């Protein structure tokens, strides 16, 4: 079984008969009725040592920040505001007090940045490495919440920022060649160590009334877009030449002998937003991006035919047949189960 199979199995046996549960398994957050005008948003993520982070290069303060960011990004993907955070922390018996102090400071800094408050949690002894589980509760106006399942055929697909940076930074750490990559390498390394949730942008998009569906990019563009399409009952076509890449990404790929397109499609942990907008609102979104001073890029469109397909080239110059890239991003269980 892969990660999607496991989630689907859990979903199959999960109860759904609850009048206050607006949206359960299948989106970035669970959506729960707070009152007639507002919804709670609830999300949880776990970071596991040697799976999500390596203590050889991940400073504890930035790990604390990242632990909050990955959850705040889920809230941003629904257009909401994070409010309360609960931490479950598993530590080996020989942990260092100084490490915990720095981790705690980073976590507190990130909470202050995103406007949320550490309200409780649990601490346990781990028989292995460090385990970090965070639950974040946020809220949003009921009429503004954005889901994955609203994409319509003909919608254009947009992404914020640039893609593949965290994956490139991780590869630089693994190869031990950050210094060779110069300033660009430091920039990419920082993307991996200390990403930022797009909360302001999520708010603006939710308030715009122009977005049909949205989610964040945590497992890679190909996998996350496949999730959005699956929930919407649609498919997608994206173009390689439209994907936004930093110059540093391309130069690092040359240095390491890697294909930067693979980092952009499958790398994960970008924590940008991907969303779909009806074609007739293209000018409005472009104008909004300029006034909001954010980088937004149109990378493809939604179709009725299922699956996520990549075309090498641009809409005006198709260089090769479309290739199905659905779910080629990060999967915890791909290498474990066959």
Image: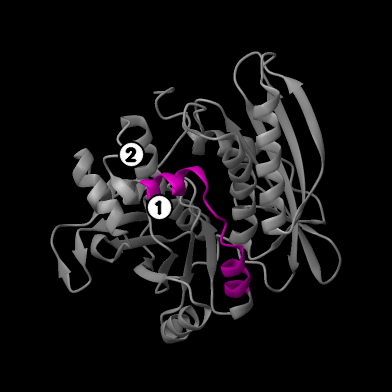
**Is residue 56 something one can see in this rendering?**
yes
Q: Residue at x 52, y 50 (%)?
A: 195
Q: Residue furthest left?
A: 319
Q: How many marks?
A: 2
Colour setting: one colour
Report the residue marked by disc 2.
178
| Range of residues picked out in magenta | 186-206
* Front residue (pair 284, 127): 127
Q: Is disc 2 in contact with disc 1, using a CB cutoff of under 8 Å?
A: no
Residue 305, quarter of the rendered image: bottom left
Q: Secondary structure at mark 2?
A: loop
Q: Is residue 20 left or right of residue 106?
A: right
Report the residue marked by disc 1.
221
Q: Is residue 114 left or right of residue 70?
A: right
Q: Earlier in the sequence, mark 2 or mark 1?
A: 2
Task: Check the image and report above or below for 293 versus 233.
Answer: below
Q: Secondary structure at mark 1?
A: helix
């Amino acid at each position: 079984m892969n990660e999607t199979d496991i989630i689907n199995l859990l979903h199959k046996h999960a109860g759904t008969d609850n009048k206050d549960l607006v949206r359960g398994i299948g989106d970035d957050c669970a959506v729960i009725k707070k009152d007639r005008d507002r919804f709670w948003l609830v999300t949880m993520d776990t970071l596991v040592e040697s799976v999500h982070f390596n203590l050889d290069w991940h400073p504890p303060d930035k790990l604390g920040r990242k632990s909050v960011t990955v959850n705040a990004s889920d809230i941003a993907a629904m257009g909401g505001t994070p409010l309360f955070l609960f931490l479950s922390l598993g530590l080996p018996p020989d942990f260092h007090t100084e490490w915990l102090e720095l981790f705690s400071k980073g976590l507190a800094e990130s909470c202050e940045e995103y406007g949320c408050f550490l309200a409780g949690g649990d601490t346990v002894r781990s028989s292995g490495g460090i385990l970090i589980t965070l639950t974040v509760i946020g809220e949003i106006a009921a009429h503004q919440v954005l889901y994955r399942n609203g994409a319509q055929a003909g919608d254009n697909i947009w992404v914020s920022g640039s893609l593949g940076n965290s994956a490139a930074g991780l590869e630089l750490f693994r190869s031990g060649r950050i210094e060779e990559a110069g300033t660009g390498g430091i920039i990419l390394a920082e993307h991996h160590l200390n990403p930022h949730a797009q909360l302001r942008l999520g708010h603006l998009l939710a308030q715009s009334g122009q977005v049909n569906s949205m989610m964040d990019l945590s497992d890679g563009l190909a996998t996350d877009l496949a999730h959005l399409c699956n929930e919407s009952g649609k498919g997608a076509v994206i173009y390689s030449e439209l994907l936004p890449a930093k110059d540093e990404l391309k130069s690092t790929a040359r240095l390491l002998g890697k294909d930067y397109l693979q980092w952009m499609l499958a790398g994960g942990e970008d924590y940008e937003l991907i969303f779909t907008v009806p074609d007739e609102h293209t000018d409005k979104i472009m104008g909004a991006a300029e006034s909001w001073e954010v980088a937004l890029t149109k990378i493809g469109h939604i179709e009725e035919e299922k699956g996520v397909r990549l075309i090498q080239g641009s809409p005006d110059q198709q260089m090769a047949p479309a290739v199905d890239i659905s779910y080629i991003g990060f999967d915890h269980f791909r290498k474990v189960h066959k």
